[in-house]
Amino acid sequence: MSGRWPWLIAVALLWQIGFAQPGAPAHAGAEFREPPVIRPQGNVLNVSLNVALGRNVIAGRTLETATYNGMIPGPTLRVRPGDRLAIALINNLSQPGGPPPPPQKVVNCGAQAAQPEARGRAGHMDPGVSLLTNIHTHGLQVSPQGNADNPYITLTPGETCDYSIPIPGAVVPPDPYRPPQPAGLFWYHPHRHMSTSKQSWAGLAGAIIVEGDLDRIPEVAEAKERLLVLQELWVDDKGHVPAGMPVPVAGSSGTQPVVGTEVPFTTNPAVPTNIYYTINGVYQPTIPIQPGETQRWRILNASPHRVYQLNLKPNGPRAMPAEMYQIAQDGITLGEAVKIDQRKNPIVMAPGNRVEIIVRIAATGTYTLAAMAYEQGHPGGALPAVTLATVASGGPVITGRRIPTTLIPAPDVSRDTIQPRAEPIVFSGNVLTAPVQFFIDNQMFAPDMKPITGDVGTTAEWTLINNDVFQHPFHIHVNPFQVVEINGKKVERPIWWDTFMLPPKTAVNGTDVPSRIKIRMRFRSDVTGKTVFHCHFLPHEDNGMMSVFELVTSGTR
Amino acid sequence: MSAARPWLMLVATAAGVVGLAGSGESQAPPISKAYIFSQAICLPPATSTPGVCVAQTVPRQSTVQIQLPGTPSRWKVVAQDGVKLKRMKVIPDPLRIAGTSEIYIFDFGPTRRGTGRITMQESPPFLAKQSKGRFTYTVTIE
């Protein structure tokens, strides 16, 4: 023990003399914890997710919000390619202080979803809308039909849906249009149009970890694994997600007594609110690491609205910076580890994004993990910086830990026959009125709108145009994509995403200039059916910025 | 308990011994007392009568904030009853709402219980053109 005292005293002194930066204080925060993990038995992962009000103490306050099994976030589901997810989703939601949900019955949710317009029309002013739910397995390359990853399922309180979601395994011989599910970090969350954002602000989200080849790379395998689920919990003064209609306001308006804690939304009717930025449901936890140790952080932005530009900074002017190397994006392994320079290529995570990094800190001391102030197009300018966690480096030094270099070759579409879609897809919005309105190709989402189609077993190129100052995060179900061109400039080494922030429009000589990107994606040959693409700022999705997308066999469009 | 846990607890304990910030849990931001209104509740479809904002309820001990997009049109308070203007500022807001480039922010404090009213004037009328440049906010102060 005596050998530890010098670094202990040093850390304490650094704290005492106040190296913490204004607005980003370092605390000996709550203990870092991770959600419980559920694994398959055989090749089937059975889990019941009870969606119901639950009480959780966050930063000393008791919040009562919608939860999965009473937890924020929900349990982590850990599977392998070829497994099947068997999820009993039980809607036991009720309004705080309201009547309890009716007795449960199992419904034929797959058949019900075939007629979405029959159950999908309730509007924003109906408070019952916030009690409707379903589940989406974000990033899994699975069927959107029946009782699989079907965004048209609607469960009212008292209804249970038995989801069955086969996860693609390897096929022999390998087929570029039927790849196994990549190993990496994915997640589940509600996706019922018009209730998605509030249920996400409540904390409804959970991680899905697919195990596989990346885990077997020696430098990755020896790194201690940590899951970091980033969430923004929006609550009123009673600890509930505010019941009124969200209305965007300036997020830097000075209404809060502590600078940097302002909320970029009000409601109609207006109530006072706070947002708590948590990691695994803990407010500003302390993440331990040993000097020289490598840790593999699987980071998920499960927030409905906040973009996180992550920054890990030592709490002292002479402290050594942390080393960070990105190894995966949105559940797909990069070809090689990329060293993160927080000024030149910072980690920027839109809602829905996942990033995996290897972290190494050579010395003892404390570090602050923060989300930098970020201009995502919201009224009033950049959202303020927020402290997320303290990283405390201490204990015995670990030597010999290596950083991975070459990882796993990513799918290469450069030799595919590309089928360009002639018409661009245009994103736009209006935040003047309530509800706000967001559009894709000048239309707000309707479940029975004419779908945009993709031929299975082909590689398509789409052009996406953003005619808005918001950096709308584009997300498409089933198929990941590469961004190959941004504002006319070719991306030299494109990587794979399933959620990518469209750059904002700009003003040139007083004229608005929309942004434009090109994406390429392979439509799996073994998945057909109707699904969606949308903005992953979930208040935007709930207010129209979603479109129907149908995977079809060639010639059936 | 993992090998890392004991030293982490020691760090936290030592920080407390020397009077540092560590308390086992970080302090949460104080609970907000701000009630924020925008133009949205004064325009259809939120209100059926343009310029007559959806009535709201606020406690006596609260801050009422009104945020309104402007510039080149300007906003000012032309009447206040039951509340008193405490401060006002303007922040940049380019490209968000067509025809505006800033947000005008007004903070009021309720002065008594009962019904309060705030009338805002936009010059020249732009967002509030249908109501001759006026938005009238009504609050029940409890």
Image: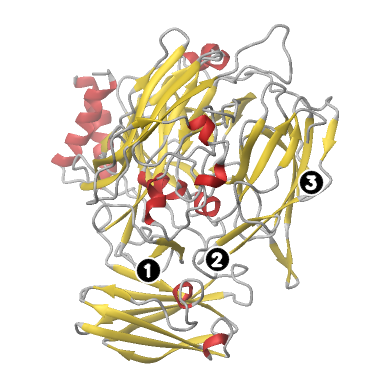
Give a yes or no on whether discs 1 and 2 share a subunit: yes
Q: Nearer the viewer, residue A212 or A362?
A: A212
User: How dense is the environment of label 2, judged by Cα within 10 Å: few (below 14), some, or many (20 and up)?
Assistant: some
Give a yes or no on whether discs 3 and 2 share a subunit: yes
A69 over A256 or under it: above or below:
above
* Residue A367 percent coordinates (x, y): 38, 39
Identify which residue is drawn at 51% across, 44% down.
A351
Please report, as a chain letter, where disc 1 is located. Answer: A
Please report, as a chain letter, where disc 2 is located. Answer: A
Q: CA distance from mark 3 to mark 2?
A: 30 Å
Is residue A364 visible in the rendered structure shown here?
A: no
Across the whole image, how many numbered discs are drawn on residues?
Answer: 3
Task: Mark 3 or mark 1: name the one nearer the start of the chain.
Answer: 1
Q: Nearer the viewer, residue A288 or A528?
A: A528
The amino acid marked with disc number 1 is: Gly
Give a yes or no on whether discs 3 and 1 share a subunit: yes
What kind of element bears circle 3? Answer: strand
Identify which residue is drawn at 81% across, 49% down.
A423
Image disc number at residue A254: 1
Q: Which residue is mark 3?
A: A489
What kind of element bears circle 2? Answer: loop
Please report, as a chain letter, where disc 3 is located. Answer: A
Figure quadrant of residue B29: bottom left
Instruction: Please report contact status of discs 1 and 2: CB closer than 8 Å, yes or no.
Output: no
Q: CA distance from mark 3 to mark 1?
A: 39 Å
Q: CA distance from mark 1 to mark 2?
A: 21 Å
Task: Mark 3 or mark 2: name the one nearer the start of the chain.
Answer: 2
Q: Mark 3 vs mark 2: give the one in front.
A: 2
Instruction: Please report contact status of discs 3 and 2: CB closer than 8 Å, yes or no.
Output: no
Q: Which residue is mark 2?
A: A431
* Residue A322 percent coordinates (x, y): 46, 34
